[in-house]
Image (cartoon, rainbow, N blue to C red):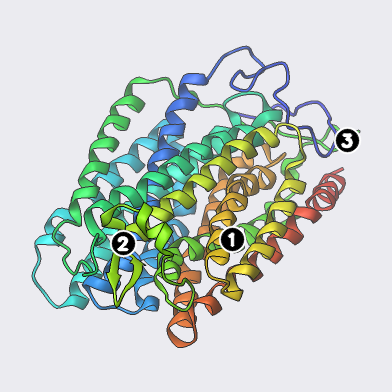
Amino acid sequence: MEATPSPARPPTPPCGTGRAGLFRTPDGVSHRTTFLLVCGLFCLSGLCNGMIDVLNKHFQNSLQVTKAQSAFVQGFWYAGYFFLALPAGMFARRYGYRGGILFGLSVITAGCLSFVPVTKIVADQRVVFVLFLLALGLVACGFTFIETIANPYATVLGAPEAGVARINLAQSCNAVGWILGPLLGGSFLLSKTEQVNTSNAALHLPYLVVAGIVAVLLVAFVLAPVPELHAAQETPAGGMGSRDEVPLFREWHFVLAIGSQFLYCAAQIGIFSFFINYLKDPACVPALPVWLAESLPPDMKYLRDGVWHLTDYCAGTMLSAAFICFTVGRFSGSALLRFAPAHRVLGCYALANVLLLGVVCLGLGWISVGALMLSFFFMSIMYPTHFALAIRGLGERTKLASSWMVTAIVGGALMPMLMGWLADHYSMRAGFLLPLVCFVGIMAYGFGWRRLYRHDLEQSS
């Protein structure tokens, strides 16, 4: 169906809800129920993403792999997004939002169930590690379809000018899933004593829980309304021509968004992946003060040589606490972006993380731990905001542009390996220098977006 160009509007429309409402399109139809289901997809995605951050430390213990090798967990997970993002976009264009979501959920179910036979296999540790990675990759393939479809879909389920706020609100549910992921995975896999867990026998259990949740969502999306809505297409100020005449690779606000999203995914996943390692590294985090140790439950501490230390389970629980900061940032950011320009918020939040990671790299003990946890707050709005800024004004090309944006997730496949290599050869603190550099690039994109967008509007006039 041909998109009807919307009336001319300023280059940077406000992020308020407008008269049509946050979930009500200009034709007067409310899509609140559909939006809530999409939020369920985001929550599920966060849950599974949060669980894989537990696997790094677990495989270091159970399969005796290095930090760089354990980062293959993220490598296989996010490589699936890279290789299947464009096919997922083409699938969605052919079979619609509902078809893409149902297919993605079916693949996730198959991947989760594949963990059951893998945990029963007795073989060389390297073989077992590869089989687990393949099972994770299959789950990731399903989430590629979900991410490719759910992000642009959230932007069209209501007033066009509220797209940034709406996608941040939906992604706030993703953040809730991130909180639950380490708790679910850690309760089955991370040790609650001084002795680390070296068994993979329970690894399939959290994924069976996920398979049950996916089954409920499958039924819901079969029965619920999933309308095929189309993104509004913008025209340059004072012009009436279609912007489809401009190739995507000449839309610089979009092209550079892919690069900035790549840097963000690299930084985010690197920080998430090695958070537990940072807390368990004696060179980064000193022993527990007695007053703090006395306030912790027995499964979060152990005494060695007269000094209290964190258990692996406690470090995993602190990761969930950091994700609470992430979630608070998502919800507060969603409200903030209804009034403040999205690109400026992105630039300011990136600047904050440059400063916080500087403190992390200095290794100031518990002050650095606090800075690391606070960095989660300022990362919170970056992924969905990149999406909203990238696809602004692209009209019917939104699904294709979304596919390209999802390929940027490959940054999360590469960064943990580089950080792990630095940690193995130098120190964990040195590894955190890499995400710091990434946030510098993100800051430049955020503060420069307005000029890029105006240039794109002018070149199409």
The three-letter amino acid code for the residue at tag 1 is Ala
Compared with residue 27, is residue 77 higher up or lower down, i.e. above or below?
A: below
- Whole-angstrom CA distance, mark 2 to mark 1, is 22 Å
Q: Look at mark 3 in the image and give the residue it sits on.
A: 237
For image coordinates 73% across by 43% down, the residue present is 342
Compared with residue 128, is residue 191 higher up or lower down, i.e. above or below?
A: above
Q: Residue furthest bottom?
A: 425
Disc 2, disc 1: CB below 8 Å? no
Instruction: Give neighbour class at mark 2: few <14, some 14-19, many 20+ (Cα, 10 Å).
Output: many
Query: Does the image show residue 414?
Result: yes
For image coordinates 46% across by 26% down, the residue present is 36
Nearest the camera: 6 or 390? 390
Q: Where residue 201 sits in the image (x, y, percent)? A: 13, 60
- Whole-angstrom CA distance, mark 3 to mark 2, is 62 Å
Q: Look at mark 2 in the image and give the residue it sits on.
A: 301
Left or right? Give the position of 450 relative to 84: right
Q: How many marks?
A: 3
Q: Circle 1 — which element?
A: helix
Instruction: Give neighbour class at mark 1: few <14, some 14-19, many 20+ (Cα, 10 Å).
Output: some
Instruction: Give neighbour class at mark 3: few <14, some 14-19, many 20+ (Cα, 10 Å).
Output: some
- For residue 350, the mark is none
Quarter-of-image position of residue 306: bottom left
The three-letter amino acid code for the residue at tag 3 is Ala
